[in-house]
Amino acid sequence: MIRSNETELCRGDQVVLAYGKLRVTPHPLEFWFPAGHLIALVGRNGSGKTTLLRALIGERTLAGGEIFLWDGSVAIRKTKPRQIAGRIAFVAQEQTVPTHLTLFDMLSLAFLPGLGWFGRLNAAQRQRIQDTMEAFGIASLADKRVKEISTGERQRAALARAILQNPRLLILDEPTNHLDPEAKARFWGSLIRETRENGCDVIVSSHDLNWVRRHATWICALSEGEIVYNGESDTFWKGEFLKRVFGEIGEEIGTPIFGDQEKLF
Amino acid sequence: MRWLSRRSFWLVAAVGLVLLLPFFGSEQIPFGDWQNPVSAGYRILWQLRVPRLALTLWVGGSLAVLGATYQILFHNPLAEPYLLGISSAVTLGIGLGEIFFSLAPYSYLSVLAGLAAALLATVVLITLSLSSLGDALDRIVLFGTGLNFLLSATLFLALSYHEQQMGGGSLRWLFGQIPWLSARGVLIFAGISVPFLGWLFLKARTLDALGLGDAVARTLGVSVAGERAHLVLVTSILVSLIVAFTGSIGFVGLIVPHAVRLLFRPPNTRTLFTSAFVMGAVFLSLSDVVSRAILPPFEFPIGIITTVVGTPFFLYLLWR
Amino acid sequence: MFLCDAKYYFRLLMVLLLLSINSPLGASGHRLVSTSPELTELLFQLGKGGDIVGTPQFSADPPDAGVIPVIGPLFMPSIEKTMRLAPDWVLLDTATLNASYEAGLRSIKQPSLRLDFSRIASLFSESRRFLEAVYGESGSATLRDTERCWQNLPHAEKTGHFLIFVWLSPPILAGNSTFISDFISAFGGSNALEPSLRLAYPQVSEDWLALHRVDTVYYLASENGREQEVKQQMRKWWPNTSPSVVALPERYFSRASLTPFHHLTELTDGTRILPRECYALAQ
């Protein structure tokens, strides 16, 4: 079910992350992620997770070094947004939306790179949007303004939009931070279901360690701008890494509490 | 579909209203005069009022679309088309031209002076947008605000030293004024600004994407800094063209997009633009006629009327 | 048959003649719209008052002007009202010029004339230009007489500074670019305001007044007289010197027209002999 034939999803070479003049990484990072995994980034707030994710999209946080994708076929710093448009999709922690935008129109933006001057959707695109909305259970909200629907529905809509882009790589930045347990379960459930069907790679950063433990197959753990662990997830949970990443509470939070709610969705 | 039929009704009503407007003004015209080429009423109607109406429709619509663009581009619901200070550059250029070079108002040279000043300001703004500062929207807005203050203060300083009288002369700097242009002048003006306005309409979807945030927009293929710079350039040119003729007419660009959102609930930016254009056009023309017909022969500066007419309407919309 | 035709043509000719006389496009071509009260007054003095079809508010002199249709407030004439009156010429006074109005007239190709009466010399030359352009006349008798009076006035040797108060508090003066200042200068002395100051009616501070030496103070006096007030202010501003004070009746001296010339005797305190031509004007 892995769509891509590469073995290496991503490789970071002397990566320096910074916000303007504020350096996030004290030392340049060297890392790689394999293809065919669900990769989770864990770490405290301020450890550099968001900065790394944004660097992957091509934002200015990549202050030095280079990141290569898909066996080195794409070098992030040298790539224009148009070129990555069909291949990477991003879901943010919270959605900023223009006041008037409806759900349907937000989803139709997924096709933006391919739309011509007049930006009209064809029938096939409309059908895809309809199908996706139904799969995510948000079809009834099609004409509602995105600002007016609940947070959980909004995050799911953002995920739907990302899926509609048909990406090879899906990047999510703490997507369930603001969601209640049911919304969380719905979101993760949709994510698992869709990425399994499409076979796209996922890099997600999250504080929801329950879910991470159950579903992530590769963990990259950051602490204060350094990579503490980058490897198979089983080994991560067994070792001392949780303590190094989260401090004293590391042992306690390693123990899963809730069951697998995502099964339901 | 429901949205479309409601809008069609209002569109027809708007067209009807607009067709009636030339018959009102500071002077009563006997109804038959509109066909009688010899009468004074004919001249007033066709040579004065109809070109003025066309100009006002065009300016009102453009201002509304510009306001909507800035509100989305800068994530700021209080944005007006004069946010970036370009309009102050134009009025300063024209003002200085009239004071120090005795350029005739509304002449080609005078307009060129305004546009030259706007060009300078736009270049600075574009450079700012493309640089690393371009990601910080607040910085650009703050810079524009500062530019606004600085340039209008300079203008008023020059005016207070040279201007002989207040009244019709100076008020137009403060509140804007729709000039009496000939039909040819209006056609030229509209013709030049059509491509820029059209460009904004074509970029409506990109604006939607930009509204979703920089990161998401980038993954949708939008070069954020580049598109923003483009949009700043096009909107600045359009604002310069308008302000060079009418001065800064406030309120239209600010309120009409919100009123459109509240009344017509457009689903995306493309429809927001079209509705805003129509509503802005009708609103400004109505304000213009009111400004002339309410207390003839005194003609209020249009900026006052747009505020006075618009505010209660807007408060009512919010309250609903 | 032939006779019938002739009668018919005769009648047709009569009708056409009658129409051409009454048609507004035909005969005179001298419908004037004035844009300032002083211009209206001047037009009456040049004998063309009957041709004025529109005038701004506050055109009170001469009394005949009161019945002329009003085209708007002083600095904001309405172009629609103006065109309603179907003028042949719109006369613009640079003192009350409205940019938008002028541009509007240009855009509908309405013939207009820009007249600048800020100097005595320009009063005469611009009046002649107006008469030439609109009537094809080379001048008028009144104009020539007034000019002769003015030219024959003995040159004043009086030096010194004067100030003309248009308003007392706050102190507003008539600047160097106004007609009244030019007029008074001919009687000797120079305006105490810097010549480089282009403002027509600058408002000055009391400190400035105290700092400047002034020999004569003129002020525009209204009907109810301000003499007490003026004397009070003089004592306040110039406690040590006492400049001579001359009252200029507002009715005669506040506008650039031929009227000030008719009241020259009020300017001189009876000590100067005026030329014969000027006495004739005062009649």
Image (cartoon, coloured by chain):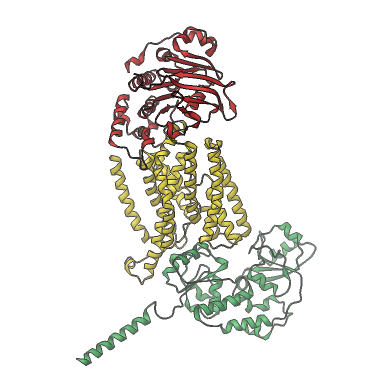
Chain colours: A red, B yellow, C green
Placement of C201 over or under C39, stated as above or below: above
Quarter of the image with the N terminus of chain B is: top left
Q: Which residue occupies the foreground of this view, A156 or A115?
A: A115
Q: Residue at x 50, y 76 (%)?
A: C64
Placement of C28 over or under A104, stated as above or below: below
Residue C193: x and y in percent read 70, 64
Residue C116: x and y in percent read 58, 71
Residue C109: x and y in percent read 45, 69
Q: Which residue occupies the foreground of this view, A6 or C39?
A: A6
In this picture, residue B176 sits left or right of residue C21: right
Place residue A197 in its image quadrant.
top left
Residue at the right extreme, as displayed: C240
Residue at the bottom extreme, as displayed: C3
Q: Which residue occupies the foreground of this view, C191 or A14?
A: A14
Q: Residue at x 67, y 81 (%)?
A: C151
Placement of C272 over or under C176, stated as above or below: below
Q: How many marks?
A: 0
Residue B110: x and y in percent read 53, 59
Quarter of the image with the C terminus of chain B is: top left
The answer to whether residue C134 is visible is yes
Q: Residue at x 59, y 77 (%)?
A: C125
In this picture, residue C212 sits left or right of residue A193: right
Q: Residue at x 53, y 83 (%)?
A: C137
